[in-house]
Amino acid sequence: MNNIDLRCGNTLNLFKEIDSSSIDIVIADPPYNLGKNYGNNHDLKGFDEYILFTRTWLSEAKRVLKPTGTIYVFMGVRFISYLYNILDKELGLFFNSWIVWHYTQGLGKTKGFSPRHDDILMFTQSNKFVFNLDDIRVPQKYYRARNNMRGANPGDVWAFSHVHYCNPNRQNHPTQKPEGLIERMVLASSHENDKVLDPFSGSGTTLRVCQQLNRQAIGFELNPEYVDMTRIRLNEPFNGFDSMDSRMERIPNDLRTADIRSQYLQDHIQWFLKNHDGAIDKFKKMVKEKYGHDAFYDEEKNSENRMQVQLKLLDGDVKT
């Protein structure tokens, strides 16, 4: 865990330990002020107190961000407009995206519409910032020669399921976020060995993702029980992230030509599923259902044949 720095304490105090202009990306999932129980504290402040708290920690986040840095902030509907105003009007950060995280299950209502999303604001320190589009593309619906078959921009509506209680990676935390959700932010807005700060570490999802993506990460957490829980989580074996955009398994239509299909299938797993080992078998099954039982066999056989040819050529070169 040499690349992970987890600190226990009040985030406003811990921010003071971070040098100015030293962080590449801040990923913040602050309390939404809805009265949730976080073990040693309750998420319930008066309106003015909560706005002051939000303004204070966001000001610190701006201070520590590099000139090319990015901040992502989760927020519920009640305070999202105030959050936007602080980031935009008061702090003068550059608005980039208003992301909607759509989840499939949530609280039920009998009067009014049941909530099925959270909002995520993406702002940057300047108009020059890191954005690695190729690292977060999603598969195309159709194969067309004019398409970029490396994939499409995922857009600003992200569909990730909650980490359900039956999931083996579920932690004892009321607002655990899916790893695939955080993976997209980290890949989009940082490079390997960059510094990522999570000022409300909670269940440790951001730290776990950074650990696997070779980023340096700093986490602040008020509850020592969550700190201990995160340390255990960081020492567990990695078998792929616990969630994924379902589009990553999407197989383009019209991959009918054998040579095109062979090349595409060779690339798809590396492009879209390399951090999601649990999805590979399902993807292969879907390929067989769509293009026939021998689609992957043909590709594996072609790869084997190419390797044999290369070895023979190499052997011939050595003999001469």
Image: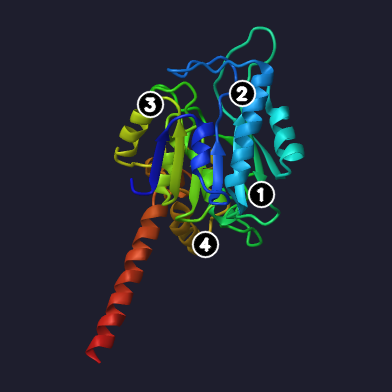
In this view, the residue farthest toward the top is 110
In this view, the residue farthest toward the bottom is 320
Do the numbered discs 2 and 1 sit on residues whose CB atoms are within 8 Å?
Answer: no
Q: CA distance from mark 2 to mark 1?
A: 30 Å
Q: Is residue 266 visible?
A: yes
Kindly report which numbered mark, 4 or 1, lies closer to the viewer in this rendering. 1
- Quarter the C terminus occupies: bottom left
Do the numbered discs 3 and 4 sit on residues whose CB atoms are within 8 Å?
Answer: no
Residue highlighted by disc 4: 260
Kindly report which numbered mark, 2 or 1, lies closer to the viewer in this rendering. 1
Q: Earlier in the sequence, mark 2 or mark 1?
A: 2
Residue 235, located in which quarter of the rendered image?
Answer: top left
Residue highlighted by disc 1: 125
Disc 3 crowd rating (10 Å Cα; few below 14, some 14-19, many 20+) is: some
Kindly report which numbered mark, 2 or 4, lies closer to the viewer in this rendering. 2
Query: Which secondary structure, mark 2?
Result: loop
Residue at 64% x, 15% y is: 46
Nearest the eye: 2 or 59: 59
Nearest the eye: 215 or 142: 215
- Callout 4 amino acid: Ile
Query: Which secondary structure, mark 4?
Result: helix
Side of 133 relative to 13 (left or right)? right
Residue highlighted by disc 2: 116
Q: Earlier in the sequence, mark 2 or mark 4?
A: 2
Q: Earlier in the sequence, mark 3 or mark 4?
A: 3
